[in-house]
Amino acid sequence: MANKENVYADGIVNLAVINGLVRIDLGTVDTYVEGGERKQRTDVTHCIVMPLNNFVRAVGVQQRLLSQLSDRAKQSAAEATRHSDATPPVSADGQG
């Protein structure tokens, strides 16, 4: 098995399909000052290349993950609402 390499990216810089292969350019954002102004530049650092059918499968995996994250956020919000509803209101004099 080949060595696994972890790659950090701030985001996807470009996405293209060329000859049935999906090319995903990943990049990082660099902040610098030029002429007294703060500017940002995105540099491409890595490229992922995969067959189109595997890319489609990867998008499905990501969609399922987003759905799970959304469900968890909704559950957390519902639990927070239940806990806040269970706490009796307190008046300004602290007597309830």
Image (tube, helix red, strand yellow):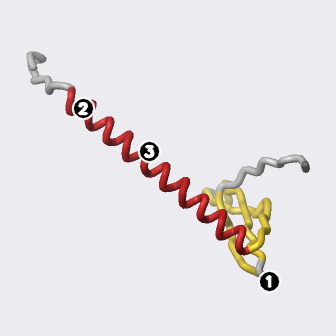
Q: Amino acid at mark 1?
A: Asn
Q: From what the image shows, is residue 44 above or below residue 22?
A: above
> Mark 2 or mark 3, which is nearer to you?
3
In what element is the residue under mark 1? Answer: loop
Q: Position of residue 86 (x, y in %)?
A: 21, 28
Q: Any mark on residue 72, and which? A: 3
Q: Any mark on residue 88, and which? A: none
Q: Position of residue 7 (x, y in %)?
A: 76, 51
Q: Is residue 72 left or right of residue 4?
A: left
Q: Which residue is mark 2?
A: 84
| Cα distance in 3D space between marks 1 and 3 | 39 Å
Q: Are marks 1 and 3 in contact (CB under 8 Å)?
A: no
Q: Amino acid at mark 3?
A: Arg
Which residue occupies the foreground of this view, 32 or 83?
A: 83
The count of marks equals 3
Residue at 44% across, 51% down: 70
